[in-house]
Amino acid sequence: MSKLPACPKCNSEYVYEDGIMLVCPECAHEWLVNADENAETNEAAVKDANGAPLSDGDAIVVIKDLKVKGSSSVVKVGTKVKNIRLVDGDHNIDCKIKCIGAMKLKSEFVKKA
C-alpha cells in the first residue's frame, strides 16, 4: 500500500483516492494526486474578453452597453472602472461605477485598461 499525503487543509491522515483525486473525509477537501498548491490558484484565474488575466485592484473598461437590472440606467461602452475586486460566482467582478453605484460584472464584457 502506498503512502498518501496528509490533507493540505486540515492535516488529516485519513486521505483516500477517488480516481485521480485525493479526498479528505474530515473536511471534504479534494485535490489532484500530482498537483501542487499553486496549480489550484492558477485554475481560478479570471480573464477579460481578450484573455488578459485580471487581479484585484486592476482598472477595466466596459466593451458593451450593459443594462442595469431593476433600473433604466445603462453602463455605456468605454466606461472605465478602477479598483475592481474579483469574487467567485457567475458575475466574477465587484466594483463601484460612478453615478450608478455598486455593480457585479462578468469578465467577458470588460477589457483590462
Image (cartoon, rainbow, N blue to C red):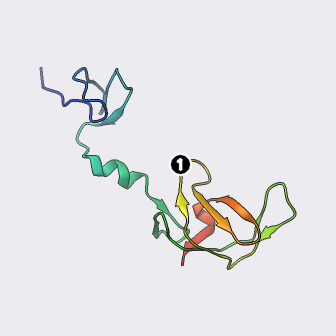
Q: Amino acid at mark 1?
A: Asp
Write down the quadrant of residue 70 in the picture.
bottom right
- Measured as percent of width and height from the top left, residue 74 is found at 80, 68
| Relative horizontal placement of residue 97, taking residue 21 as reference (left or right) | right
Who's the residue at 50% across and 70% down the image? 58
Q: Residues within 10 Å of mark 1 (few under 14, many from 20)?
A: few
Who's the residue at 43% across and 57% down the image? 45
Query: Which residue is tagged 1?
Result: 88
- Measured as percent of width and height from the top left, residue 47 is found at 49, 63
| Relative horizontal placement of residue 84, taking residue 15 as reference (left or right) | right
28 is higher (above) or lower (below) than 82:
above
Who's the residue at 37% across and 26% down the image? 27
53 is higher (above) or lower (below) than 39:
below
Could you tell me which secondary element the residue under label 1 belongs to? loop
Name the image quarter holding the C terminus.
Answer: bottom right
Who's the residue at 62% across and 63% down the image? 95
Name the image quarter holding the N terminus.
Answer: top left
- Measured as percent of width and height from the top left, residue 103 is found at 68, 60
Q: How many marks can you see?
A: 1
Q: Nearer the viewer, residue 97 or 32?
A: 97
Q: Residue furthest right?
A: 72
| Relative horizontal placement of residue 101, taking residue 15 as reference (left or right) | right
11 is higher (above) or lower (below) than 105:
above
Q: Nearer the viewer, residue 82 or 42?
A: 82
